[in-house]
Image (spheres, helix red, strand yellow):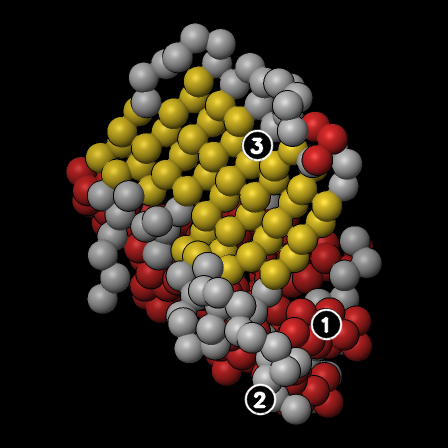
Amino acid sequence: MSESQKRILDMLANKKISVDEAYRLLSVLQPEGSASESAPRAGTSAKTKAKYLRVTVVPGPEHKDDPDAELVNVRVPMSLVRSGMKFTSLIPPEARDKVTGALHEKGIDFDMRNLKPEDLEELIEALSELEVNVVSAKEVVKVFVE
Amino acid sequence: MKRPPLFLRVKIQEKKALPGCWLPLFVLVPLALALLIVLSPLILVAYIIVRLRGRHKKLPTVLTATLGVLCSWRRMMAACDLFCSTTGLRVDVSGPDERVHISVI
């Protein structure tokens, strides 16, 4: 079991994250567990520090030549993600309560008060191994860290 | 210490190409800060009045958060850190007839 997996399980045991969130994070980390069996992926070695969170939307295989296709390319510096997450802990209590209430109304049971600086670092570290690929006939959405 | 962003580049291109707009943040930010320092006593007084009257719960979340940030040195520093971290941010969205490009340099 890797360090990241242990941390996720610790966070679950301390009720900092839900079972679903832990499952998703563990699923993301799954390739890491089998890293010793397979060759490491190019450019994603554990030691390289992630610099950007990328979100791209490109036309799917059936719409590659579609002139109406939309392209999205977003590059968010990881330092901005880190600062933004730290900033959430400094949100005034009145605003934080409103945000928590609004999230609860949407069915998201998440309280920002539970986020601690050490948890943020763990989350960001876990985020550096994030890779999401959603492929449909119309478009391909990729979320990854580089 | 992080370097603050120097330029904000915005390019909105519809059917015909429009020139991109380069906003010199290194000029605008000191001006905004100077304005903020001048207005800070008024903001503080407004915040205290709103709190004393108990109306802060009725304010929109964004305004509550902004006032809270402006009235705390720690939060101001965090906001500056957040601003400085935007260097390198790039958003590029293109559709059939238009294209929007925003980048912070």
**Viewer-nearest residue: A45 or A143:** A45
Residue drawn at x 55%, y 48% as measured from the top left: A55
Q: Is residue A128 above or below residue B33?
A: below
Q: Is residue B6 above or below residue A17?
A: above
Q: Which residue is mark 2?
A: A3
Q: Quadrant of residue A132?
A: bottom right
**Left or right of residue B11: residue A121:** right
- Specify the label residue A27 is tagged with: 1
Query: Distance from label 2 to label 3 (Cα)?
Result: 37 Å
Say what amino acid the circle numbered 1 marks: Ser
Sequence-wise, the earlier of marks 1 and 3 is: 1
User: Regarding mark 1 in the picture, which secondary structure is present there?
Assistant: helix
Tell which subunit mark 2 falls on. A
Is disc 3 surrounded by few (<14), some (14 to 19) or many (20+) residues within 10 Å? some
Tell which subunit mark 1 falls on. A
Q: Quadrant of residue B72?
A: bottom left
Q: Which residue, as the protein is rendered here, is positioned at the far top?
A: B16
User: Regarding mark 3 in the picture, which secondary structure is present there?
Assistant: strand
Say what amino acid the circle numbered 2 marks: Glu
Image marks 2 and 1: residues in contact by CB distance under 8 Å? no
Sequence-wise, the earlier of marks 2 and 3 is: 2
Tell me, yes or no, whether dots 1 and 3 are on the same chain.
Answer: yes
Query: Distance from label 1 to label 3 (Cα)?
Result: 28 Å
Q: Which residue is mark 3?
A: A71
User: Regarding mark 2 in the picture, which secondary structure is present there?
Assistant: helix
**Quadrant housing the C terminus of chain B:** top left
**Left or right of residue A36: residue B38:** left
